[in-house]
Image (cartoon, grey):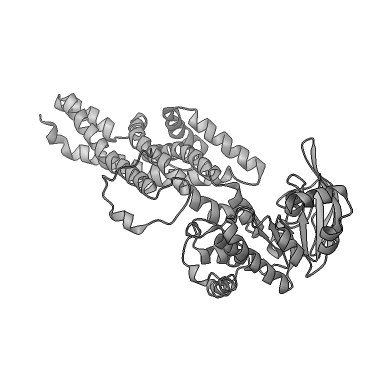
Amino acid sequence: MSIFHYTDSLLRAAVMTLKLCAFGAVAGTAWGLVVGLLRASSFRPLRWLAALYTSVLRGVPILIVLLFTYYGLPLAMPNLRFSAYICGAIGLTLFVGAYVAEAVRGGLESVPTGQTEAAQALGLSNFQRLRLVMLPQAVRVIVPPWIGILLALVKETSLVSVVGLVELTRAGRVVGQESNNTLAAFALVALVYFVICWPIGQFGRWYEHRLAASGLRTVHEPAVSNLLGEDAEVPTGGAA
Amino acid sequence: MIRVEGLTKSYGAHQVLKGVSCEIAKGEVVCVIGPSGSGKSTFLRCLNMLETFDGGTVVVNGHDLSARSVDARAVRREVGMVFQHFNLFPHLRVVDNITLAPVHVSKKSKGVSEANAMELLERVGLADKARVFPKSLSGGQQQRVAIARALAMEPVAMLFDEPTSALDPETVDDVLQVMRRLADDGMTMVVVSHEMGFTRDVADRVLFMDHGVVIEEGTPEQVFGNPQHDRTRAFLRRVS
């Protein structure tokens, strides 16, 4: 039977993958921002905890993280029911959060110390300094690795199939077996992953072009609105 | 207004301040001169707690900075600081640089803060630059914005850390002129400077520092006209 017979189930699986991506991207980025800011906290135990979190999560295969959330969450909170989707989404969030936190830390460290001193001298609190002075300047340094993290996320969602969730990869295998056309099924699945990743990568390239076009990567200046209409083929002048 | 007694500070084994004492009255303009590495900037930065110190007493506008309970933000709200490298916030327009602290630290309304910022910009001769980003300004203009930014908090005293050292010669005068006017208006000022002309004209008192101690202090006439110490004489010969 032609694999197009299974379009519906593949579509449903693609939607599941997209849902996992969206959840992981939004929640993971928010969580990573929190952890990254905690790493810049003035309270040492918080800094330490945040550093421990990022190094552990970055040092463990995401597969293990997913198995932990799938088997661990119901044990930790026996009164709540966790669907495979929620467990997978939380696992991905923890994973993305650790990498985003690291990018945020790097971004904050890229802001010159004079900025910290100026903010302090004006009486800003530590949190105000981070929010109003540091983060807006760190964004440029955070976005490029963040794009890479999102691309990794899209591909890592395939691992959620280990907890029994039917997402693209899992659906591809099932469809491949049933249709007796494994290669075609996986080719289709691969195409869908690519279609999800491509715009993210394009956004990253556009952002880098914009940085290059603005002349500098880490020195900060206004977002020039007319660059939005810029031709994507503008050479980057070697900025990578 | 500011009272310093026996201030000491070390970086590791190197003692940069070896018991500095001085008293600065309300409305007084005190210039601190001395060779580089003499500890004058460190001394200045102790006055708004950008540096911690090891020993001695520092009282600024009634706050005992050596007390454990001292509220650093309260001190910094009341004392403005101008840096050698301006340290304007590059992601904010000139006017937003000035209103940031009034809005977020003093909790003033945006409208009131902006009106005040425009008045300050008028005072430093940059009213037409309110909507531009710091990057498009010359060094001297940036420093005048930095002065306006500090003044926006209505400080009782202003600290200047080599405010003209990073400037192109042709923009120095505009900055000094703003500082002169500030002194005429009765602002309490502590100025670390290499501008001997300015010091001579504007200072009520001059402190000559070397190797972490105040070697000599007096009116500009005394210090420049009749220096008592060899080291002062040697330094003045070199800079004039």
x, y percent for residue A26: 40, 47
Q: Toward which corner of the image does residue A181 lie, by quadrant?
A: top left
Horizontal relation, residue A40 to residue A157: left or right: right
Q: Which residue: 49% across, 71% down?
A: B128
Q: Which residue: 33% across, 33% down?
A: A155
Viewer-closest of B130 and A98: B130
Viewer-closest of B95 and B179: B179
Query: Can I make out residue A84 in this image?
Result: no
x, y percent for residue A93: 44, 40
Task: Point out the image quarter for the N terminus of chain A.
Answer: top left
Task: Point out the image quarter for the C terminus of chain A.
Answer: top left
Q: Residue furthest right?
A: B228
x, y percent for residue B28: 79, 67
Query: Can I make out residue A75 in this image?
Result: yes
Above or below, B22 against A77 in this view is: below
Horizontal relation, residue B93 to residue B224: left or right: left
Horizontal relation, residue A132 to residue A84: left or right: right
Above or below, B206 against A168 in this view is: below
Above or below, B117 against A165 in this view is: below
Q: Toward which corner of the image does residue B190 lie, by quadrant?
A: bottom right
x, y percent for residue A34: 52, 46
Viewer-closest of B106 and A221: A221
Marks counted in the figure total 0
Viewer-closest of A237 and B206: B206
Horizontal relation, residue B214 to residue B47: left or right: right
